[in-house]
Image (spheres, rainbow, N blue to C red):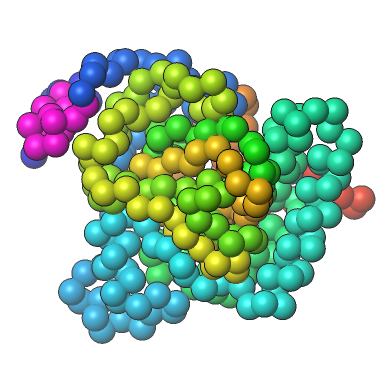
Amino acid sequence: GKFSSREAAVEFQQQQLFLHLQWPRTSLVSKPERSPIWDHPEELEDQKEYTFRGTFRPDYMKRKNLALSNEQLRKFDENGFLLGVPILEPEDLQVARTEFDELLASRIDRAPSDEARFRSAHTLSRPLHQKVVARLAKHQKVIAVVEDIIGPKFVCWSAHLFCKLPGDPTEQPWHQDAGFWPLSQSRALTVWIAFDDVDASNAGVTFVKGTHRLGRLGWQPTDTEHHLLTQKIPDVDLLGELVQQTLRAGEASIHSDLTVHSSGPNRSSKRRAGLALRFVGTDARCLGSMINGYNMNQACIQCKGEKSDPSGHWQTLRRRPGGKRAGPRH
């Protein structure tokens, strides 16, 4: 049914979550502090729709899948994520890892302290401008996986070249990506390609099954010392089964922007490196800029050329000669 206001819908959602899951144990903060780096302004919130659009329906039994089986699509719809999806062949993996290692070394070799090294490794600069990112965002298997889930029209609007070094104490609190992105609809997903073997020992991501169907969940302020986000979703053990990301190098995990997930500190002697490619169906719209001024729709990789977004809302990333950043195409 329809509600008279967003406030009424949120109140109903909270009542149902407590009735069926006894969530949360403690009170939520109505408007937690938004991250100045990762978040959008509060005034855009009322324009957003947090609804998961399923990929698997009975009539899909007749469709021609590009990469994922019907069983994989059913599991994605049920769980909100997939693990162990093969993407890179050994030769492709070696090339990607070599390029990544060179970029990483340029960031951390002169860092004056361990803390500086950890921070530098977390985010390699201007990822969409890096050759390895542009190539993998258009990789045949990546495109096929994304199209199987969100349909034929999509762009890669963001990427994160990432490494959690051995001993890095940083935690990523429990969160939903959709809460931070100024999208009109929850039509985004992340393809996380592992450059190293990943498991619990080197701080692989943990997902909470089924949370993509609960809508936007409330927050509390983050209370850990070393964190990237200022908010967290509390009491996730009440929301669903926790599933550890386990990947071999060259494999990927895929998750919906509504799926609750987190990662802990890396207490092992092994790094965890990979590439997070973020895609959005182009039927969604960017509602405005992030708090830091970044506009999601003004510099994207058009994975399928002009077919990616015939409307032109999601604009193409360009580069000037010499590698300097150019403005968006209008």
Q: Quadrant of residue 274?
A: bottom right
Q: If the image is split into quadrants, where does the N terminus sit?
A: top left
**Residue 171 position in % (x across, y down):** 52, 33
Which residue is located at x 18 percent, y 74 percent?
58
Q: How many marks?
A: 0
Q: Is residue 176 above or below residue 134?
A: above
- In depth, the one of 258 and 44 nearer the eye is 258
In the image: residue 88, left or right of residue 20 = right
Say above or below: 9 vs 33: below
Magenta stretch containing residue 330, yes or no?
no
Q: Which residues are magenta?
A: 10-24
* Residue 227 visible in image: yes
Q: Is residue 131 visible?
A: no
Residue 19 forms part of the magenta stretch: yes
Q: Main secondary structure of the magenta part?
A: helix
In the image, is residue 198 above or below residue 251?
above
Looking at the rendering, which quadrant does residue 19 occupy? top left
In this rendering, position of residue 102 left or right of residue 24: right
Residue 286 coordinates in the image, percent (x, y): 48, 39
**Residue 228 drawn at (x, y percent):** 56, 29
Q: Residue at x 55, y 57 (%)?
A: 198
Horizontally, residue 22 falls left or right of residue 289, namely left
Residue at the image point whose x is 28% and y is 18% from the top: 28
Q: Residue at x 26, y 49 (%)?
A: 241
Residue 213 in percent (x, y) is at 24, 47
